[in-house]
Image (tube, rainbow, N blue to C red):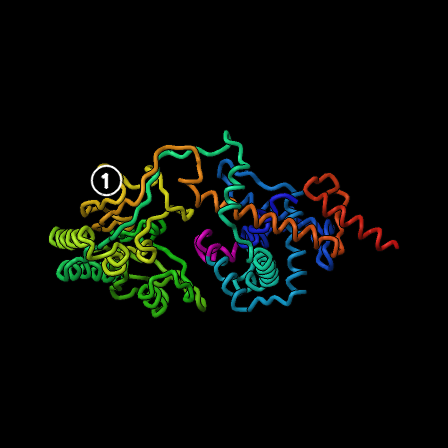
Amino acid sequence: MKKVFLIVVLLSAGMVSVMAQAKKVVADKIVGQVGDRIILRSDILNEIADMKRQYQGQENIVFPTECQVLERQLIQKALILQAEKDSLVVTEEEIDATIDNRIRAAIQQYGSKDVLEEIAGKTVYQLKEDFRSSFREQKLAEQMQNKIIETVKITPTEVKAYYNKIPKDSLPFYESEVELSQIVIIPKANRDVEEYVSKQMYDYKKSVESGTQKFEALVKLYSEDPGSKDQGGQYNLNRNDRNWDPAFLSASFRLKENQISPVVKSKFGLHIIQLMSRSGDEAVVRHILRIPPVTEDEIKDAVKKLDSVKKQLLAGSLSFGEAVSKYSEDENSKFSAGSISGQDGNVFLSIDMLDKDMVVALKDLKPGDYSAPQVYTDERGRKAVRLIHLKRRTEPHRENLMDDYNRIAQRALESKKTQALDKWFKEHIPNYFISIDKDFTGCESLKEWKAAAAKAEIDRKN
């Protein structure tokens, strides 16, 4: 039962596609059973079909075999049975939150709630009810897995032993990498500029309400939101989703259908919002975003402030962490002492992961240095000013314990968790009634499950 942890971790992703339930493959043969939990042939085929639909058109995707899917589902059933035996509890609130997140993702994928319901042949409410049982099982399995591995820790001695077992010619090679922190100030437009842009947006609102302009046409002409501009400014909202800006969310749910809001100020800029449709806590809106431009005066003020901060840092009268807490306005790094990390959470970044302005700023810095305040454009298209702290720079190198301890330790920990799960299954599989259909007798990965199934058959006959 190799790589159990990697297989089971897929449970946290849940159903790979909400549309799975809409186009089921007709097959009702029982191909596996753990205790009183059965697995149908259709469960196997549909899961593979769902993944192929989800990743259609993407290259280099390796889809699981039927043997691998059956193994994953056997694992899930065993975890569920043990979770119930251990009296683990999944609350209705947890299930509702999971279902709502999946439904929102599906609506986003298909463009609107109406399109989703048309393709599925069911209402969103019916889809939620259909998924309730399966999501409960997934949460139970996830809880049981976490219970098994929650006490697994790794020591420096174990990390070293793990590293020493890796063939030297298999160690990855890393290009030069840097560890960085930053303090970011986002200059605010002055009141006159903000009022001027706001007036323009009220003109947009009047032109749509008078029928002289189409809202979606104005989106294409004026909106500065790259995330929705090509979709006519459309977003699918849920009142309980805290990822949305509170001002934007609140204004959206105060509207009546087809009504256009007054100008709304959020952390992203200024909006006018039109409600297209609403059903309970779900709403479809479209909006126009304008980001009031800052002048050179506001930018110079921000540069001057960071110049002052740099002097305090160099004088030792202010620590970098204190400076981040007091001055930084970057949401992604403010609560990690300004540390910049990649999408995988790694704080060591290769040069090609940095924006070109940051690469220029780092060119003459040595570890421990601070850059001059740098004006740049952030991912939202706003002018911002940052002070960069180069904490560490590595040379191109083969992976080693000194430079890459955290990476190696993480892999060692995952390996140890996998071993813990392997051990748990080896100990617990014999305790369950196991049945596997003869069509899967050739699956090498199911060897231990088949041995348990054979033993169960002997026990039944005796």
Asked if residue 345 lies left or right of residue 294, the reply is: right
Please state the horizontal and vertical placement of residue 300, each as a whole percent of the image: 12, 51
Please state the horizontal and vertical placement of residue 159, each as a whole percent of the image: 50, 44
Q: Amino acid at mark 1?
A: Leu
Asked if residue 375 lies left or right of residue 297, the reply is: right
**Which range of residues does the magenta coloring cover?**
105-119
Task: Name which residue lies at 28% across and 51% down.
Answer: 380
Could you say whether the residue bearing mark 1 is in a helix, strand or loop?
Answer: loop
| Front-most of residues 309 and 87 | 309
Residue sticking out furthest to the right? 462
Please state the horizontal and vertical placement of residue 64, each as a whole percent of the image: 60, 42
Badge 1 is on which residue?
365
User: Any magenta on residue 132?
Assistant: no
Asked if residue 307 lies left or right of residue 267, the reply is: left
Q: Main secondary structure of the magenta part?
A: helix
| Front-most of residues 40 and 309 | 309
